[in-house]
Amino acid sequence: MRDTVYFTLPRIKRLMVPYISFYIIGYAFEAAKTITKHGQLDLMDFFDPLLGATHGYANTPVWFLLSLAEISLIGYVLLRYLPNLFAFVVSMVLGIVGYYCGKYNVLQPYYVNVSLMCIPFFLGGSFFKDFLLKKQKYPFVGIGLLLISWFLYLPNTPSCNVSQCYISCSMFQFALVSSLATIGIVLLSGDIAKYTKFTSNAFCHYGANSLIVLCTHMLFVNIPVFVNKVLHINSLSIIIGFFILLFVEIPVIKVINQRFKILISK
C-alpha cells in the first residue's frame, strides 16, 4: 500500500510543470482575446493564481494539479509516519476540517481547504483501487451506484463547486454521493469499454491522455457556446459540444505527445 501512494520530487514535478506551462498558455490565449477586444491588458492579472487566487484567472482547470500536488504531499506524510488505518482516520478528520474551512472561507488561497477536504477520497481510492479495477462478475453495477448517488443528491437543490470548496450539503452526504458516483463511473466505464474494441480504445486513449485534456479543454470552451447559438437547445448543445471537443482534442493530444512533451513533464 505504501508503494501506491508515494511522494517524490519527480511526482510533484509531473504535476507542477503542466500546471505552470498550461497556465501560461491559457493566459496567452486570454491576453490575446482581451487585447483584440479591448485594446489593452493588465499584466498584473498574470500573477493572480501565483498569489493564491482560486478563481477568475486563465485556464482555471489547472487548479486540480496544484491541489493534487498538495494532497500527494499530505498523503505521503500520513502514510510515511502512520499505520494505514490510523492514516485513513486522520485523513477523514482533515477532510472534515477542510469542509468547514470551506464553509467559513478559511484557508482558501492555493486551494488548501479543498485539498484537505479531498484527502480521504485520495487515500480511500488508493486503498480500494485494486478491488475496483478487478473484473466485476455483475455487469452495470455502476449504473445502480450512479442512480443511488443521484437520488441521494436530489434533495440537495443548490449545486456544489468543489474547486471553491462550496459544498451545499452535509459532509456525510457529500462524501456518500461523491464516493458512490465515483465508483459508479469507474465500474460503468469498465463495462462500456468491454463491449467493443472502439469504446475500449477510446477510453484507453483519453484516459492515458487525461492530463492533456484537463489542461487544454478550456482553450476550446467556446465550442459548446457556438453550438448553442446555432441550436438554441442548451442540454443538446452541451452534449454535441462535448463530443466535438473530444474530436478536437485528438490532434492536440498527438501534437503535444510528439512535439511538446516538455509541457507535460515527459
Image: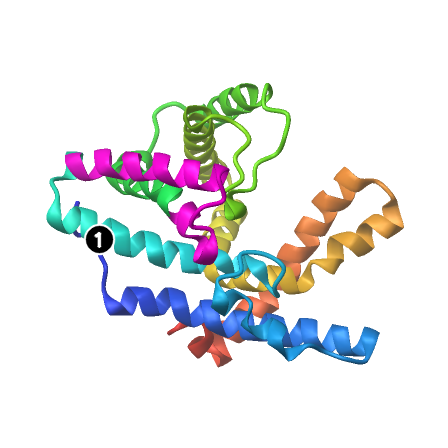
Q: Is residue 109 above or below residue 17?
A: above
The residue that appears at 41% across and 30% down in the rendered structure is 175
Where does residue 155 sit, x and y in percent of width and height?
Answer: 59, 19
The residue that appears at 81% across and 52% down in the rendered structure is 227
Quadrant of the rendering where the C terminus is positioned: bottom left
- Horizontal arrangement in the rendering, residue 119 relative to residue 245 (left or right): left
Q: Please name whichever residue, 223 or 6, is drawn nearer the observer in this view of the structure.
A: 6
Residue named by callout 1:
76
Where does residue 177 sit, x and y in percent of width and height?
Answer: 47, 27
Residue 5 in view, yes or no: no
Where does residue 114 sit, x and y in percent of width and height?
Answer: 43, 46
Residue extent of the magenta highlight: 86-115
The quadrant where residue 123 appears: top left
Question: Is 73 part of what is drawn in magenta?
Answer: no
The quadrant where residue 95 appears: top left
Residue 244 in view, yes or no: yes
Q: Secondary structure at mark 1?
A: helix
The residue that appears at 42% across and 50% down in the rendered structure is 107
Q: How is the image coloured?
A: rainbow
Number of marks:
1
Crowding around mark 1 (Cα neighbors within 10 Å: few <14, some 14 to 19, many 20+) is many
Q: Amino acid at mark 1?
A: Tyr
Main secondary structure found in the magenta portion = helix
- Horizontal arrangement in the rendering, residue 58 relative to residue 83 (left or right): right
